[in-house]
Image (spheres, rainbow, N blue to C red):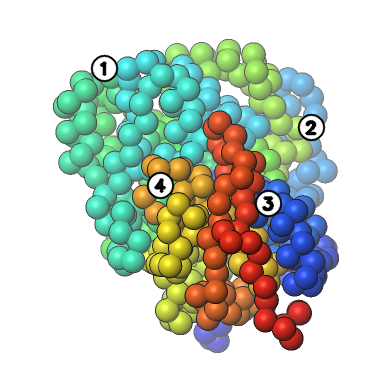
Amino acid sequence: MPKTIIEPFRIKSVEPIRWTTRAQREQLLAAAHYNMFLLPADDVLIDLLTDSGTGAMSTHQWAAIMEGDESYAGSRSFERFRRSVQDIFGYKHVIPTHQGRAAERILFGIACRKGMVVPNNTHFDTTRANVEFTGAEAVDLLTAEGRQPALAHPFKGNMDVTALEALIERVGREQVPLVMLTVTNNSGGGQPVAMENVRAVSAVCRRHGIPLYFDACRFAENAWFIRLREPGYEHKTPKEIAQEMFSYGDGCTMSAKKDGMANIGGFLCTNDDKLAQQEKDLLILTEGYPTYGGLAGRDLEAIAVGVQEALEEDYLRYRIASTAYLGNHIAAAGVPIVQPPGGHAIYLDARAFLPHIPVEQFPGVALAAELYLEGGVRSVEIGTLMFAGAAQMDLVRLAIPRRVYTQSHVDYLVEVILEVWKNRERIRGLRLTHEAPFLRHFTAHLEPVGGVVARPAGNTA
Ligand code: F0G
């Protein structure tokens, strides 16, 4: 059998992408104030801003969309959605929401109060914000391995179980309404959580009578890493692995824009009857009736098919291999990345890439700007612009949309990154010229320190 891992699909509908010249990109970047969020998507050649809602749907999903039942209550599409989600996740109540953060707001809005503490391996920013909005405290308890970017370890998304025990001891069981595990750990480099760690966290939760919830966005990618890296799982299907993982918990929040393979949608699951009733009451107030939760019937159909497709072995083999291919090729040339390559993204370590740019001059933003100038590639800074003084690292995330780009797109990315790496000493820092009072990375304006750098003559492509 040939060794090459190929895209396990052929293309039926294509969407053109647009080339720009270097001179145009210089103008476009200046007009966007060096902020990737302010660039028009049409002026981006390869868009790695996020893997959320940017995936390509399959023929089966498009066919299911035509079967969408748009009845307000009790629609057939909801029944299909509920059955498909329950088949994998196994929880008693399945509540649709318009995306992941809506599920978070409803869950934390009911479970959390001021003075409480929610532990997680690492909270994603909307998860943290939704916990904090209730007055509760969001605490990250990532293992020590997960906090060292260059260290290779199979499960850098694991929670520190000893720290969890100590936290519960310190604040008291009544102050911990639930424990969360984010699979895979997006803010920590897209790194997986081991089944052994899920079992250990679950055992602590059971002993104290605290419910365990999953932030399940990338559950299928996490299942594949368990199969590749954890003894005893090499012959299990990704679905069996996902089912076992969810069996150790009491519910989940989910953004179907990731491993739901849909462009919009999410859900909230729980085994708790009383909580489910409260959640549905709140859902009706802000999202919609519990059989659609802010989604169209056709969206529910796309998710029902998508969560199953995300677990297909050929797909996961290609998905994880393709992300690793990008990471391994640039790392082999010396480019500093978070090791090992994650499931949905490669994270460049901008402080190591650009040691001559001080942290106050946003090395991550400078690197993202240069990737755009060099090859029309859009990425996102996760560092000092996003988290200000709280940033422990300055990373540039290259998130890979699902089933969208081909091998030659990835080869092109490798070339662009290596060209930027070669010329890294010429890259300059940036300074802020405008910032909003919160979530400033979305709207910030910046400019190069010491003015725009001139490009050597003769390189106009
Ligand atoms: N949890 C995790 C781990 C996430 O990565 C996201 C979204 C959410 C929750 C919220 O879901 O967007 O549907 O409301 N992450 C996207 C990203 C936005 O780019 O990483 P949502």
Chain-order first, disc 4 or disc 2: 2
Chain-order first, disc 3 or disc 4: 3
- Mark 3, mark 4: which one is toward the viewer? 3
- Mark 3, mark 2: which one is toward the viewer? 3
Marks 4 & 2, CB-CB < 8 Å contact = no
Q: Is residue 90 above or below residue 259?
A: above
Mark pair 3, 2: CA separation: 44 Å
Q: Is residue 451 above or below residue 389?
A: below
Q: Quadrant of residue 176?
A: top left
Question: Where is mark 3, residue-wise?
Answer: 33
- Mark 2, mark 1: which one is toward the viewer? 1
Chain-order first, disc 2 or disc 1: 2
Q: Mark 3 is on which residue type? A: His
Where residue 146 appears, as percent x and y from the top left, is 31, 54
Tell me the crowding category of disc 4: few under 14, some 14 to 19, or many 20 or more residues within 10 angstroms, Cα based: some
Tell me the crowding category of disc 1: few under 14, some 14 to 19, or many 20 or more residues within 10 angstroms, Cα based: few
Mark pair 3, 4: CA separation: 22 Å
Q: Mark 1 is on which residue type? A: Glu
